[in-house]
Amino acid sequence: MTPEAPLLLGSGQLLDGALVSAFLQNIPDSVYFKDRDSRFIAVSASMLRHMGMTSDAEILGKTDFELFAEGHAGLAFADEQRIMRTGDPVIGQVEKECWPDGRVTWVLTSKLALHDDEGEVVGTIGISKDITAQKAMESSLEQTRRELAQASRLAGMAEVATGVLHNVGNVLNSLNVSANVIAAGLRESKVDRLERVADLLRAHAGDLRAFLRSDPKGRMIPEFLSVLAQHFLEERARLLRELEALEQNIGHIKEIVIMQQAYATVAGVREPLSPVALMEDSLRMTAADLARSDLMVAREFEACPSVLAERGKVMQILINLIRNARYAVEAGSCGDKRITLRVQAPTADTVRFTITDNGVGIAPENLTRIFGHGFTTRVGGHGFGLHTSALAAKEMHGRLSVESPGPDQGAAFVLELPAVPVPAAEPPAP
C-alpha cells in the first residue's frame, strides 16, 4: 500500500518513505503515484478501500486498463500522457469511473506531473475525492425538479381543462333549459282540441252546413279554429326560438371543443400567432366565468406583429391570468369592478399582453414571491398556475412579470413574447 523505504522516483529520492507512508495511510481521499507508463507505484489506503482491495499488491504495477472498463481507462491514460508531455495539470475534473462489473462511480480528481530530484518528469500524481453519493443526490434533485415542473405544468393544463369543462357545463345547462321548454311546450300543446273539432266535423259530415249555422257548438267552431290557429302560430314561434337557442348552444360547445383541440398542440412547436386572436380566444374560453361576475371587461388592442410561440402554452397563461384577475376583482372592495386586456408592441421585436384589474392588489413583499412554486394568497389556491405560467413564458423565450401599487390597488400581469421577425426589404431592382 505504502512504501516503508524511501519512494524512489527515477534516479533520485523524492520523499522520505516514512513520511510518504504516513501521508498515504491517513489521507481520506484516494491518492496515487504512477510511472511514465501509467503503472501504479504507490496508493493511499483510502484508494485501496475505494477499489475494494485489501493489499497494495493487488494494484501496484498495474494500469487502469487492468482495473477499469476500457473507455474510462483510455481517457485516464490520455490525460496522464498529455500531462507528462506538456506539464499542464488537471484540476478539479469530474470523472466517471466505469468498472468491469458494470458499476459506475464518480470522482472529483486533480492530476499533475511527478518530477524527480533533477526535475525530470517521471510519472504523475493524482488525488481523487469520491463524489458518487453527491452525484446521486444531484441526480435525484434534478429528477425531483423535473417531476415538480411536470406536476406544475399538468396542474396548469388541468386548470385550463377545468375552465373548458366549466364553460361546457354552463352551456349544457342552457341546453337542458331549452330542451325542457320544448318538451313542456309539446306536452301542453292544444293539438288534442283540434282532434276533438275534427271528431265533431266528422260526426256531422252529412249536415255540415246546418251544423255550422244552427248548432251552438257548430257556430263556435270557426272562432275556435281561429283562436287555435293563433295559438299554434305563437307556440311554433316560441319553439323555434328555443330550437335556435339549442342550435347556438350546441355550436358554442363545438366551438369550445374545437378551440381546445386547436390549442392542444405538440409541445415545443412554435409558430406565428395573432396576439389579438389569442386574447380573444382566451376571453371566449373564460366567458362563462366572466358572465357570472358583475364586472366590466375592457379591450385595448393595438395593431401588432404576430408572436412566435406555442398555442397551448399561451392559452394556458392567458386563461390563468384572466381567471386570477376575476378572483382578484371579486375579492376586492372597488365598486366599479373592471378587468382591462391590452395587446401592444412596445418594440419591433416584442409583443406585450397585459391583464390589469382593480382588485385586491399585491403586497410589496409578495411581488418577488408571486411566481414561486406553491405560493398563493387565494383561499383554495394551489400556487401552481402562476409558477407554471412563468416557466411556460420562459420556455418560449418570453417573460411574465407583475406590477401592483399595493393592497386594494389592483395589479397588472404582463406577458412579453418575441414577435415574428420582419423580413428585410429587398433592394429595388436596377
Image: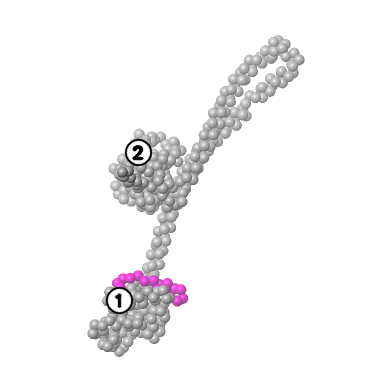
Q: Which mark is residue 83?
A: 1
Outermost residue toward the front?
430
Q: Position of residue 396 (x, y in %)?
A: 38, 51
* Residue found at x 34% / y 77%: 30
Q: Is residue 236 visible?
A: yes
The disc label shown at residue 303, or none: 2
Is 109 one of the magenta-colored residues? no
Q: Main secondary structure of the magenta part?
A: strand
What's the residue at 59%, 20% (across, down)? 230
Residue range corresponding to the magenta coloring: 90-105
Q: Which type of secondary structure does the marked residue at label 1 adopt?
A: helix
Residue type at mark 2 is Ala
**How has the structure been colored for display?**
one colour
* SS state under label 2: loop
Residue, far left: 118
Q: Quadrant of the C terminus?
A: top left
Give the percent coordinates (x, y) of residue 305: 36, 42
What is the crowding at mark 1: few (fewer than 14 residues within 10 Å), some, or many (at least 20)? many
Q: Between residues 404 and 47, which one lies in front from this camera angle? A: 47
In reply to whether residue 96 is colored magenta, the answer given is: yes
Q: Which residue reaches farthest right? A: 206
Q: Is residue 253 left or right of residue 42?
A: right
Q: Residue drawn 32% across and 87% down?
A: 3
Side (left or right) of 198 relative to 31: right
Going by the numbered disc 1, the residue's amino acid type is: Ile
